[in-house]
Image: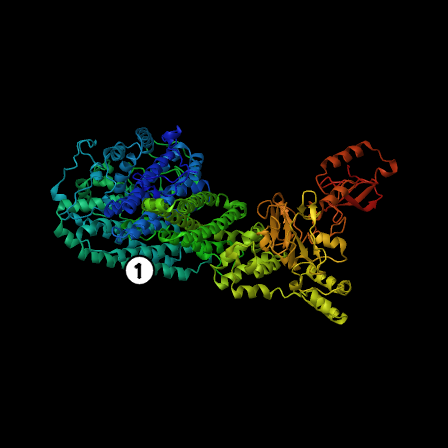
Amino acid sequence: MATPTPMPGGEGTLAAVMPRSPSPTPAEAGTSAAETPVLIFLYFHKAIRAELEALHGAAVRLATERSGDVAALAERCRFFFNIYKHHCDAEDAVIFPALDIRVKNVAGTYSLEHKGESDLFSQLFALLQLDIQNDDGLRRELASCTGAIQTCLSQHMSKEEEQVFPLLTKKFSCEEQADLVWQFLCNIPVNMMADFLPWLSTSVSPDEHQDIRNCLCKVVPDEKLLQQVVFTWIEGKTKIEVAESPADDNSAEDVPDQGEKHICSRQDSKLGSRNCAESNDGQIHRHPIDDILHWHNAIRKDLHDIAEETRRVQQSGDLSDISAFNERLQFIADVCIYHSITEDQVIFPAVDSELSFVQEHAEEERRFNNFRCLIQQIQIAGAKSTAVDFYSKLCSHADKILETIEKHFCNEETKVLPQARMLFSPEKQRELSYKSLCVMPLKLLERVLPWLVSKLSDEQASSFLQNMCLAGTVRCLLDDIDDLDKCRSFCPCASRNSSGLPVQLQSENGSRPGKRGKDAESFPCTNGSYYSQTAVIEASPCSKKPCCIPGLRVECSNLGIRSLASAKSFRSLSYNFTAPSLYSSLFSWEKDASLSCPDGISRPIDTIFKFHKAIRKDLEYLDVESGKLIDGDESSLRQFIGRFRLLWGLYRAHSNAEDEIVFPALESRETLHNVSHSYTLDHKQEEELFEDISNVLLELSHLYDSRSHAQTEVNEVERNCSDSSNEADWARKYNELTTKLQGMCKSIRVALTNHVHREELELWPLFDKHFSVEEQDKLVGRIIGSTGAEVLQSMLPWVTSALSQEEQNKMLDTWKQATKNTMFGEWLNEWWKGAPTSSDSPAEASSTPDSHLQDKLEQNDQMFKPGWKDIFRMNQSELEAEVRKVSRDPTLDPRRKAYLIQNLMTSRWIAAQQKLPEPNSEECTDGASIPGCVPSYRDEEKQIYGCEHYKRNCKLVAACCNKLFTCRFCHDKVSDHTMERKATQEMMCMVCLKIQPVGPICQTPSCNGLSMAKYYCNICKFFDDERTVYHCPFCNLCRLGKGLGVDFFHCMKCNCCLGMKLTEHKCREKGLETNCPICCDFLFTSSAAVRALPCGHFMHSACFQAYTCSHYTCPICCKSLGDMAVYFGMLDALLAAEELPEEYRDRCQDILCNDCEKKGRCRFHWLYHKCGSCGSYNTRVIKTDTADCSTPN
């Protein structure tokens, strides 16, 4: 087992739990990212892992050595969060939607993981704002938090490398992979790309760096200036200081970022005769910061158009253009949100650090979201929607958005712009405007710039473009723009015709120039439509032609991915620590989860997810208590270990049930293929986390043991000399291990909490949608039926302690419904009542349950259970009255009712056979007055105690006749009545011959805790010292085998334990609760082996062997007992060679097949009649016809 990765300087004590074997990079594996472009993401993962290790190492040094700068660590964390967040957002916007088109049900869970990771960073940043430098506890918590982030992100990337990347390489061609990588890069903001690529280049080897270059040569379009910009980014900043985040460098005196200088190198770029510094001062706006007004006016204009369109729709009632309307709304929302982000990150901090419009921006985003949700609702509802209500809401939402933004813009224009004009020179104003553009990704810039220019006059547009060229790098991206008219030609909006809404955008050629242009294959999109390289795509905010810059080619793709991602996912970059919403229509799990079970009815499958509440409770305990162990003692450690072992065992049972039962059930639905594979990988990774924690706890236990051992061996003189040094060394080791344990417990809490949360969001609603209540009941029964009694005894108190009374009642109702055909209720009552004194129950199960739970279990089990003493005192009339009472009791199980009536009716005869009343146990402590008070042997020569049936070291006192017998079979062999073993209260140890309460060990001091047998059941009062036995809580009997879920499971409908290979079998309700059709012994309680027949009936295995020597059909239903193909083939050959007398040749017989249960006709024969449907000879004649028969056989 791999140990956690150590950090330099001895900080390995808090190392995060890492996946065992991260995937090798292409260069390490002998492959090439240039040949398989999607493998470039492995280099991204390598850089992320290296940064995570460095961050965690710095946090550990701060916690253990108190060395390091908290501010520098916080800045480095923010930089890494910027990098990783944009990486995740680009995956959500490009990679996962493309994969979802080809392979369903894979991408959603990874996008949900991204949200959980954002929440982790939120906790980290909140912690960094506290006084960490002067608080040891906070420093340890910081190290644990960074370790948890390292563990979760490493697990997430390992799962992507195991599941997602192989699918991408398999389902996408090399050209399509290059498209995906380019679209991925184009979804990262320009200013972040200037830092991301240099940061990536510092994390790889020279060979890997060259492989990345070769891959980018294939990925980046054949636009020379664009390629020069990209390769300048990856080459020009080789000594990047990752602790510095340019996105936060917004002071009024700042100069342009170093990374931005590399975007447009005026000496190296091929700008022809044009010079970036040349401009006509007379045409440049006096205050370049007033370019913000152009954005405001363009947004106002489009919002006015949208509001007018809503009123037109209200008047005409025409919703045919609702999709195009939604596209335009999406585009203007993205523009508004990104404009807000640029203001929050660039403009406002430069003008006044205390100036903020965060609330206004959040309100605008909320109103846009509400507007889009309303449109999505009408698209989903279709004809079912109420048009009048929708039209009024549509107009209302449009007016509210326009009013909110108008008010916001007016405040900015009166409060912010005047200050900016006074504070900054024209050069600084141009720089701020340019930096605000760089906050946008290249994908959005391609559409936004032509859109904005098309809204301006000639003078305004010229001024804006020249300001951008003077400020920095946009000249490189617009090298093909020689003049204003050419820029406007990129956007058909320049026609100024805004009376109608545009509906579609025609792709010019479907691929980047010179790149993958020959593939004209169509690919399905998420809405069921198809995209191709020459297809019409619904993406334009304003026209049927692309509003984009052709040289960039970031908008065209042959993958069928929606071209524009929502900007709201980048809102979190302003460090407000709010988790972003998922913007892709593919990932709508939160909506699904909220809509599940709208009627509030509890579903049977909810029982499984009730375990999540108990898991969360114990995870919190581990996280909190692990931090207290450093000041605790050995008893605290023992208690912690016990709680951990319980959680590990129960979580393993829960995980196995999901992997073996729940997930295969989901995968069996055609529309849900691949939905659970990611969670199966989670279970494997979480098992590794538990194993690592177990190893640390074992080290701590050994550390305490070594301390105790050393203290007992050294003498007084040596102890005084070595106490100080040994104690200091012991304390240092103990501190290292407890600190390491705290980090691991934090990691496993975060990992498991996110896992179960994603299951509830993604998988839980699927059961309600795809499984009926009956199917859910069967699933729950299958899960419970694979859970052994020992696990249930630990699980039930553990789960119920975390649930409210109402939740407990619902869970027990579900369990009772699933186990209605079994003896589970009887076992539950017997075990729970006996739990406080049970010697084989775990400590957690021995506590007294809540009173309301005990009452609930007893209310439905009011069956008559008279003891032998009561029966002996009854006269005949009383017995008859009790028989009638039992017979009329509707709550009794028929089998139980028959058993009680039979015993009551024979009780007078049994009582007459008793010579003496039952003696008190106090009077027979020495066993002298009880018959049979002598040892019995299974092997007298070897002095092995027991009998011919069992090996054991005790005898049982039969409650019915107060005699000693080794087992119930020995009793029944010499008695005229049967022994009720569960009524046994006393036993005799065959070593000391003392009568004592029945139990697993002898309580006599002289025997020194002698075990009565290896296996003891407190419910059945059963002992066995040589075989593997388990108690089935559903049969409420002890049976041979390793246990439920190991080699047997209990079928709730058949009410019997079956081998695991019989998971798929023909169920018959309470099929085992009957007599053997051959020997007529009761099968349910039989100690002989029982065989399940293909038809669903049962008989003893020995009876089956004897019966099949002369028969091949079931004695009950007459179906064939196996595959009779060979035998039936012999009969075919026999009949083919046989010639019937002439008078019988043309006669027919009507037959009924016992196997397929179909009627048919066949030629006359006095013995063999073949079914025409299934070919079986297991048939019977129902009619003989003397007419001519045309049947060929």
Viewer-proximal residue among 257 and 128: 128
Left or right of 580? Residue 1099 is right
- Tell me the kind of residue under disc 1: Lys
User: Visible in this render: residue 564?
Assistant: no
Q: Which colour style is shown? A: rainbow
Q: Is residue 195 above or below residue 1057?
A: above
Left or right of 1104? Residue 1144 is right
Viewer-proximal residue among 425 and 1095: 1095
Left or right of 656? Residue 227 is left
Left or right of 95? Residue 871 is right
> Looking at the figure, which quarter contains the N terminus?
top left
Residue 451: horizontal and vertical position, in percent? 27, 46
Q: Which residue is mark 1?
A: 400
Q: Quadrant of residue 1128?
A: top right
Viewer-proximal residue among 482 and 55: 55
Q: Quadrant of residue 815?
A: bottom right
Viewer-proximal residue among 517 and 167: 167
Residue 360: horizontal and vertical position, in percent? 27, 57
Residue 1052: horizontal and vertical position, in percent? 62, 53
Packing grade of label 1 (10 A; few <14, some 14-19, many >=20) is some
Residue 572: horizontal and vertical position, in percent? 30, 50
> Looking at the figure, which quarter contains the C terminus?
top right
Secondary structure beneath dot 1 equals helix
